[in-house]
Image (spheres, rainbow, N blue to C red):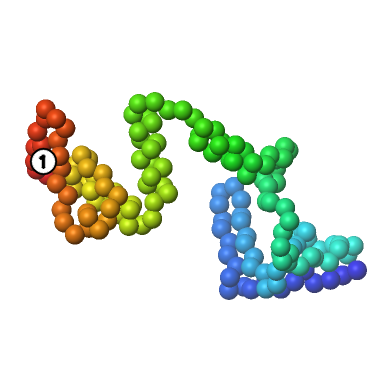
Amino acid sequence: MAYDKGTIIPEKCRYLVLSTKVEIRLSKAEAITWTSSEYNENAVPPKINTLPAATSHKPSYPSSKSKVDWDKLEAEVKKQEKEEKLEGDAALNKFFQDIYRDADEDTKRAMRKSFVESNGTVLSTNWNEVGSKKVEGSAPDGMEMKKWEY
């Protein structure tokens, strides 16, 4: 049974000649799958590529032999990170990261502006307070602030 493989759009086709191969890219007029580029009288007509309205399964890597539920694995890792008990600077850093991650845009803007303008000595989450004026740095007890010239 002979059939037409479909039509191509010559203006959108391209080719590349390399020392080891010739690569030809054909642009199809219809969204069909070609099982082969060769003519075969017994060939099955090409299937039209259509996406179902709602896919019930999640995409997976085609060559993967094991089926891993990556969403479940991600949820477990996030749960472990939440339950992890940190100490010292790591705990303080995570605390500020959590505040920044869960904050609205005004709070994030206030945190960035106050930290940069104070050379890392002030961190404010109140945009109404920080947005209207320059944030002055404050040195810890026993130290003094120095102006850095760029």
> Is 31 in front, or is 50?
50
Residue 67 image offset from top left, x and y in percent: 72, 40
Seen in the picture, residue 83 relative to 20 is either above or below; the reply is above
Taking the image as shown, residue 143 lies to the left or right of residue 94, namely left
Residue 144 image offset from top left, x and y in percent: 9, 33
Looking at the rendered structure, the secondary structure element under dot 1 is: loop
Taking the image as shown, residue 78 lies to the left or right of residue 35, namely left
Residue drawn at (15%, 53%) of the image:
134
Residue 125 image offset from top left, x and y in percent: 30, 50
Quadrant hosting residue 49: bottom right
Taking the image as shown, residue 113 lies to the left or right of residue 43, namely left
Which residue is farthest top? 87
Count of picture labels: 1
Taking the image as shown, residue 73 lies to the left or right of residue 50, namely left
Quadrant hosting residue 40: bottom right
Amino acid marked by disc 1: Trp
Residue 41 image offset from top left, x and y in percent: 88, 64
Q: Quadrant of the N terminus?
A: bottom right
Quadrant hosting residue 53: bottom right
> Is 46 in front, or is 86?
86
Residue drawn at (56%, 58%) of the image:
16
Q: Crowding near pointer 1: few (<14 within 10 Å), some, many (20+)?
A: few
> Is 21 in front, or is 107?
107
Q: Quadrant of the C terminus?
A: top left
Residue drawn at (71%, 62%) of the image:
54
Q: Which residue is mark 1?
A: 148
Residue drawn at (67%, 73%) of the image:
29
